C-alpha cells in the first residue's frame, strides 16, 4: 500500500512537469473540452427560443445549467487511454510498463488525476465566466449537492473502467481508431451529451437508461440539478455500481488475456 | 503555374501509389466517414424532432451546411493539413533543408507534399449530402445562387488554407508546436451549425480568429440565397488579403530557419 502511495506521488510530479512542458497540447484539450458543450448549449438555447422559450420543460437557462454541469462532469471523467493504449501496443512502449512491479493502470490513474487537477485550474474560471454569459438556472439543494459527489466519483470510475476495457481491444486489433470513433459517437448520443435524455425519442431514451453511458455523464448532471426523484437517484446509484462491477470484471479478464497476446512489436 | 499543377499531380499520384499498399486504411476511412455522417444526421434528427427551424434555418438548409462542412473538411485534410503537419515536423527535425534546396517555391512545395488519399471519400460524401440538400431545397436554388456558392466556397477554402499556413509558419519561431493545427480541428466542429446561433463573442471568434464562418456558413448562405452582398464582398476581400499576409509571414518566417540538425 505504501508502495502505491510512493508510486502515485512520483507519477504526480512527473506528470505535472511534463504537462507544463507541453502547454500547447494542454490548451488544445481545454479548448475542445469547453467548446463541445458550448456548441450543444447554443443549439438547444436557439431551439428553446424558437419554441417560445421552452422545449419539453427545458428553458434556455435550464440548458445552460445542464451543459455547464456536463462540462465539469466530462472534464472530470474523460480519459485518453483508448488512444494511448493503441500507441503503447503498436510502438512496443507497453513492455517497460509491464516489467514494473505495479500494474500499469496505476500509472495511468495517477496521470489522469494530475491532468484533471491541472486543467481544472483553467476549466473552473472558464465555467465561472460562462455562468455570467449564459445565466444558468442553478437550482441545487443541499441533498443533491451531497449526492452529486459520490455520483461523480462513480461516474469517473465507471468511465475509466469501461474505457480501459475498450482500450484493451488494441491487443487484438492493431488499428482501433475506427472503433474508438464509433464508441465516442455512441457515448455522445446515449450519455446525454447531444441532448438531455428527456429530449431523445422514447425508444432511444429507454435504451440509454439501460446502458452505462448515461451513468457516466447525464445521471450525475441531472442528479445535481434536482431533475431526478429520490427513487430515480437510488436506481441510478445501483446502476452505476452494477456497471462498475461488471466493467471491472471485464477489464481484468481482457487485460489478463491481452497481455498474454501481446508480442511487443517494435521493441 | 503549369509546373505547380504538375507538382501537385505528381504528389497526388505518389500519395495514391503509397496508400494502395495499405488497403485496410480505405476500410477504416469508409467507417470513419460513415460514422461522421451518421453523427451529423442523427444530431439534426434530434434537433428537428423538437423544432422545424433552428435560428431561421430549415432542415434541408442545415443539411446543406453538413454537406459543406464535410466537403471543406475533406478538401483541407486531403492535402493541406497533412502537408503542413509534415512541414512542421521538418522544421523541428531540420529536414526542411531538403525542401528548400529544390528549384521550386518552398511555400508551394510544403503545401502539397503530403496527400491523404482516402480523405477524398469525405469530399464525395460532402458532395452527395449537398446534392440531396439541394434536391430538397428544390426550385429555390437557381444559377445565381450556384455561382455565388462556388465563389464563396473558393474564397472560404483560400481563407482556411492561408489561416493554416499562418499557424504552421509559427513553427519557425516555436519549434515544438505539433499540435497547433489540432486547435483548428477542435474548433472546426463548431462549423457543423450555422455560426449565427452562437453567442456574439463565440461568433466573433469563429469569424475573425478562426475563420470557420467564412469557410462553411457563408458559402451555404450563398447556396440557400440568404447571403448579403456585404458578407460576400467581405469574404472575397479576406480571400485576397489573407493569402498575401500569409505569404509575407512565410517570407519573414523562413528567414528564421536555421536548419536544426544540419
Image (cartoon, helix red, strand yellow):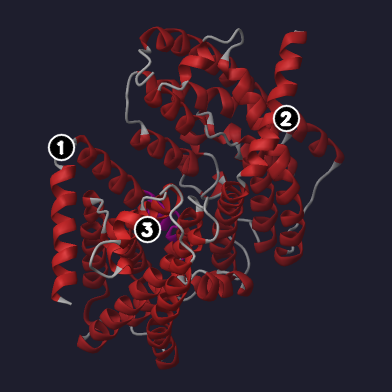
- Above or below, A128 relative to A71: below
Q: Residues within 10 Å of mark 1 (few under 14, many from 20)?
A: few
Q: Residue at x 48, y 50 (%)?
A: B178
Say if residue B74 shows up in the picture. Answer: no
In-front residue for pair A115/B167: B167
Which residue in the protein does label 1 denote?
Answer: B21
- 1 and 3 marks in contact (CB < 8 Å): no
Q: Give left or right: position of B59 versus B181.
A: left
Say if residue B158 shows up in the picture. Answer: yes
Looking at the picture, how far across and down is residue A3, in whole percent? 73, 9
In terms of image quadrants, where is residue B248? bottom left
- Could you tell me which chain the residue with mark 3 belongs to? B
- Above or below, A160 relative to B177: above
Q: Residue at x 53, y 62 (%)?
A: A43
Q: How many tags in the picture? A: 3
- Furthest residue in direction right, as rendered: A142
Q: Which mark is residue A13?
A: 2
Looking at the picture, how far across and down is residue B8, in whole percent? 19, 64
Real-space Cα separation, disc 2 to disc 3, in angstroms: 34 Å
Query: Of helix, strand and loop, which one carries label 3?
Result: helix
Q: Main secondary structure of the magenta part?
A: helix
Which residue in the protein does label 3 denote?
Answer: B84
- Above or below, B32 relative to A264: below
Q: In which quadrant will I find the N terminus of chain A? A: top right
Q: Residues within 10 Å of mark 2 (few under 14, many from 20)?
A: few
Whether marks 1 and 3 lie on the same chain: yes
Query: Of helix, strand and loop, which one carries label 1?
Result: loop
Whether marks 2 and 1 lie on the same chain: no
Q: Is residue B44 magenta?
A: yes
Which badge, 1 or 3, is on the more N-terminal residue? Answer: 1
Task: Report the span colored magenta.
Answer: B39-52
Real-space Cα separation, disc 1 to disc 3, in angstroms: 23 Å
Amino acid at each position: 500500500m505504501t508502495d502505491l502511495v510512493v508510486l502515485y506521488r512520483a507519477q504526480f510530479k512527473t506528470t505535472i512537469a511534463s504537462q507544463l512542458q507541453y502547454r500547447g497540447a494542454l490548451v488544445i484539450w481545454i479548448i475542445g473540452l469547453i467548446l463541445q458543450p458550448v456548441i450543444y448549449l447554443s443549439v438547444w438555447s436557439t431551439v428553446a427560443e424558437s419554441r417560445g422559450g421552452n422545449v419539453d420543460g427545458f428553458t434556455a437557462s435550464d440548458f445552460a445549467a445542464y451543459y455547464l454541469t456536463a462540462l465539469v462532469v466530462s472534464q472530470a471523467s474523460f480519459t485518453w487511454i483508448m488512444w494511448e493504449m493503441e500507441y503503447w501496443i503498436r510502438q512496443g512502449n507497453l513492455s517497460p510498463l509491464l516489467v514494473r512491479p505495479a500494474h500499469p493502470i496505476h500509472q495511468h490513474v495517477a496521470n489522469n488525476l494530475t491532468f484533471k487537477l491541472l486543467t481544472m485550474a483553467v476549466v473552473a474560471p472558464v465555467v465561472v465566466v460562462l455562468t455570467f454569459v449564459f445565466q444558468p438556472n442553478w437550482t441545487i439543494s443541499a441533498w443533491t449537492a451531497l449526492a452529486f459527489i459520490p455520483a461523480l466519483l462513480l461516474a469517473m470510475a465507471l468511465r475509466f473502467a469501461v474505457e480501459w476495457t475498450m482500450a484493451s481491444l488494441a491487443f487484438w486489433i492493431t488499428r482501433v481508431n475506427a472503433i474508438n470513433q464509433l464508441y465516442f459517437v455512441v457515448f455522445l448520443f446515449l450519455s446525454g451529451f447531444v441532448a438531455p435524455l428527456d429530449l431523445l425519442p422514447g425508444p432511444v431514451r429507454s435504451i440509454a437508461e439501460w446502458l452505462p453511458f448515461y451513468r457516466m455523464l447525464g445521471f450525475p448532471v441531472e442528479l445535481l440539478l434536482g431533475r431526478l426523484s429520490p427513487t430515480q437517484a437510488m436506481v441510478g446509484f445501483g446502476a452505476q455500481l452494477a456497471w462498475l462491477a461488471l466493467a471491472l470484471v471485464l477489464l481484468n479478464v481482457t487485460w489478463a488475456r491481452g497481455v498474454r497476446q501481446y508480442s511487443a512489436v517494435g521493441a | 503555374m503549369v509546373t505547380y499543377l504538375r507538382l501537385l499531380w505528381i504528389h497526388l499520384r505518389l500519395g495514391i501509389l503509397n496508400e494502395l499498399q495499405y488497403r485496410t486504411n480505405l476500410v477504416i476511412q469508409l467507417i470513419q466517414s460513415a460514422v461522421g455522417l451518421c453523427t451529423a444526421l442523427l444530431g439534426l434528427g434530434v434537433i428537428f424532432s423538437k423544432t422545424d427551424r433552428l435560428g431561421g434555418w430549415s432542415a434541408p438548409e442545415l443539411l446543406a451546411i453538413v454537406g459543406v462542412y464535410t466537403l471543406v473538411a475533406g478538401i483541407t485534410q486531403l492535402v493541406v493539413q497533412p502537408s503542413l503537419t509534415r512541414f512542421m515536423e521538418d522544421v523541428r527535425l531540420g529536414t526542411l533543408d531538403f525542401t528548400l534546396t529544390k528549384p521550386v517555391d518552398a511555400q508551394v512545395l510544403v503545401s502539397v507534399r503530403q496527400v491523404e488519399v482516402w480523405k477524398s471519400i469525405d469530399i464525395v460524401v460532402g458532395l452527395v449530402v449537398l446534392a440531396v440538400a439541394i434536391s430538397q431545397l428544390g426550385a429555390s436554388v437557381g444559377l445565381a445562387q450556384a455561382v455565388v456558392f462556388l465563389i464563396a466556397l473558393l474564397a472560404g477554402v483560400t481563407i482556411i488554407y492561408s489561416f493554416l499556413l499562418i499557424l504552421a509558419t509559427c513553427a519557425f519561431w516555436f519549434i515544438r508546436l505539433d499540435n497547433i493545427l489540432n486547435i483548428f480541428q477542435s474548433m472546426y466542429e463548431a462549423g457543423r451549425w450555422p455560426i449565427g446561433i452562437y453567442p456574439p463573442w463565440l461568433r466573433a471568434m469563429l469569424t475573425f480568429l478562426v475563420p470557420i464562418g467564412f469557410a462553411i456558413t457563408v458559402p451555404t448562405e450563398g447556396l440557400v440565397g440568404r447571403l448579403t452582398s456585404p458578407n460576400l464582398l467581405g469574404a472575397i476581400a479576406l480571400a485576397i488579403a489573407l493569402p498575401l499576409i500569409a505569404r509575407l509571414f512565410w517570407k519573414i518566417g523562413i528567414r528564421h530557419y536555421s536548419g536544426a540538425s544540419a
